[in-house]
Amino acid sequence: MNISHEPGYNYVMQMLPELIESFKEPHKSASRKGFTLVELMVVIMIIGIISGVVLTAMGSGDQTRKVDAGITRLDSLFSLARSAAITRQQTTRVIIHFDPADEEKFLRYATIVYR
């Protein structure tokens, strides 16, 4: 079978040198250097958002974390007192040490009392 008699063979043979030359030329987009203003603005905006989130997370002081930890501890203490009251079918009380003179235990000591 002779390929030269196939339809389109002559057209392909004519276009082949142009196709080979197009692969040798560097692409116009590859020769572009630098950034556009839009690309720079997008990068600056992303950096601003990320730095804002990081600074906000780091900015919440030590006192805020202590208060959050105290709230979490009290919440779990009240949940424990409630479940103990239901389990024992008794009244329970949560007693929190409130003596400003005793700074070591002031609002740090709590217990559950059963009746």
Image: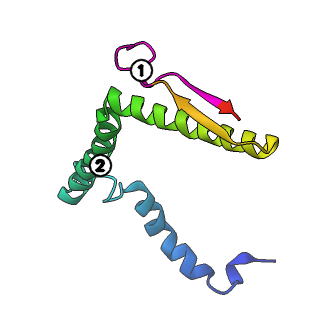
| Marked residue nearer the N-terminal end (2 or 1) | 2
Foreground pick, 113 / 77: 113
Q: Residue at x 66, y 87 (%)?
A: 7
The answer to which of 109 and 70 lies nearer the viewer is: 109
Q: Does residue 15 belong to the magenta stretch?
A: no
Residue drawn 37% across the image and 14% down it: 103
| Callout 1 secondary element | loop
From which residue to which does the magenta span run? 98-112
Q: Which residue is mark 2?
A: 49
Residue at the spot x=28%, y=34% of the render?
59
Say which amino acid is labelled 1: Phe
Q: Quadrant of the C terminus?
A: top right
For mark 1, what is the residue? 106
Q: Main secondary structure of the magenta part?
A: loop
> What residue is shown at x 27% (from left), y 44% (from top)?
52
Could you tell me how far apart the alpha carbons at marks 2 and 1 are, in whole angstroms? Answer: 41 Å
101 versus 35 height, above or below: above
Q: How many marks?
A: 2
Q: For the view shown, which residue lies furthest in the front direction? A: 115
* Mark 2 element type: helix
Q: Position of residue 87 (x, y in %)?
A: 80, 43
Amino acid type of the residue that numbered disc 2 sits on in the rendered structure: Ile
